[in-house]
Image (spheres, rainbow, N blue to C red):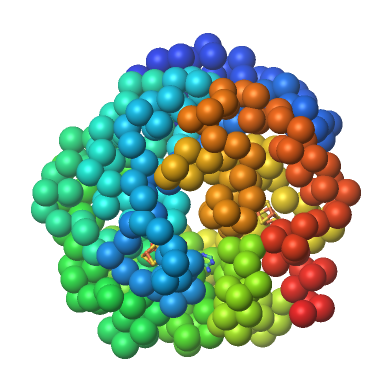
Amino acid sequence: MRKILFGGTGNFFFTKIINAFKYFLTRKNKLLKLKYLPLSMDIEPTTGCNFRCTMCQVSSPDFEARNMDLKTFKTVIDQNKQLIKIKLQGMGEPFVNKHLFKMIKYANSNGISVEFVTNGGLLNDENINKILKSEISRITISIDGATKSTFENIRIKSNFEQVILNAKKLSKAIKENKYKTDFEAICLVQKNNFDEIEKISDLCNQIGFHTLHFQVQLTGWGKEDWEQVNYKKDINYSDLGIQDRFKKLKTEKSNSNFKIIVLEENLLNFSKQCSYPFENPYLSATGKIIPCCMIADENVINFGSIKEENFLSIWNSEKYQSFRKDIINNSLENYCKNCYEEFRTKS
Ligand SMILES: C[S@@+](CC[C@H](N)C(=O)[O-])C[C@H]1O[C@@H](n2cnc3c(N)ncnc32)[C@H](O)[C@@H]1O
Ligand code: SF4
Ligand code: SF4
């Protein structure tokens, strides 16, 4: 248990415990100036990608490919020894950054658990061997279809057979080496793949994933043009018929070795408010702090750069506090409205 929570080494154990204690003690008070630092953070190793998925802003012609340098990564870790977990993933494919495994090692040496989500396209033998030599608490592969045409029509530039073969190879390596990780799949459900959710479950079970997550709402990245495109792809999860189909799927296809989860925590409304600005910041590849992975673009909004300021002063800056206040008051900026039921249903 301690190994999962504190990245294996137990380093900075007391720093983490004291911060976690402050978090649990004050979190419910909805303060604007927080008495704790985040327990988890999303860190974007790169915005470069080998795919061009139809719903992803990486596919915008003007989206720039950038890699995080090791110095920026170490700076944020050095200023955040209290972290329990990081997700090394943002816009882009983590394996594109050649420093990825050095980042994992550095985080682990600071007692931080690491997880990432990958498109599976670059999971070659070399990367699988490197994974086996690292400590990664959770590895997730995006599986957006059970057939070549569905998968490749969403995940442009991908090769379905290659991704599935890579996933199977990693699954085998995990089993044979008794490698301790949560091996998971995620499917972003959209009109184009909804018909395949049962087949996707069977495929993921057959590959050997421990868990399959269904994400049921697309983000528009806080941008009007992407909202227009992605709204049209969304299934209507508030439809009870659709919810029943997921319930049936979970009952019929989950078992003790294979769990199916429908991700409902990102479905927000005025009484179920967003928690990101209070607990989980997002660090862009260039070093800017952004509210969350639903925006994931520093040009939409950012709170400052850790290349210029200490993380703590950004975390409790006036801009971050004002953002928290807007969330508490349900006085949302346009880039947040896409997440809230009240605004989605009106559009
Ligand atoms: C941005 S990708 C980065 C990691 C890796 N490149 C991948 O595709 O798994 C992380 C996750 O975001 C999902 N995603 C892409 N576009 C999305 C959107 N518009 N709304 C919500 N999730 C999205 C992907 O399907 C993937 O599971
Ligand atoms: S979803 Fe992942 S694989 Fe697809 S374009 Fe975006 S970053 Fe690349
Ligand atoms: S409400 Fe705003 S901060 Fe929260 S997840 Fe949505 S875009 Fe991010």
Quadrant hosting ligand 3: bottom right
Could you tell me if residue 307 is visible in this image?
yes
What residue is at 54 percent from the left and 54 percent from the top? 296
190 lies left or right of 265 = left
Q: Residue 304, percent across and down? A: 60, 37
Image position of 134 (left or right of 2): left
Answer yes or no: is residue 83 visible. no
Residue 319: percent from the left, percent from the top?
74, 38
Q: Residue at left 48%, top 62%?
A: 213
Residue at 65% from the left image edge and 30% from the top image edge: 315
Image quadrant in which the N terminus is located: top left
Q: How many marks?
A: 0
In the orientation shown, which residue stands out farthest toward the right? Answer: 329
Query: Is 341 above or below relative to 3?
Result: below
Give x and y (percent) for residue 323.
76, 44
Q: Nearer the viewer, residue 339 or 260?
A: 339
User: Where, quadrant-wise, is the C terminus in this rendering?
Assistant: bottom right
| Image height of 346 relative to 43, above or below | below
* Image quadrant in which you'd find residue 107: top left
Residue projecting furthest to the left: 125
Q: Quadrant of residue 279?
A: top right
Q: Position of residue 90 (x, y in %)?
A: 45, 52
Q: Is residue 289 above or below residue 202?
A: above
Say which residue appears at 52% left-offset and 61% top-offset: 261
Report the side of 200 relative to 24 (left or right): left
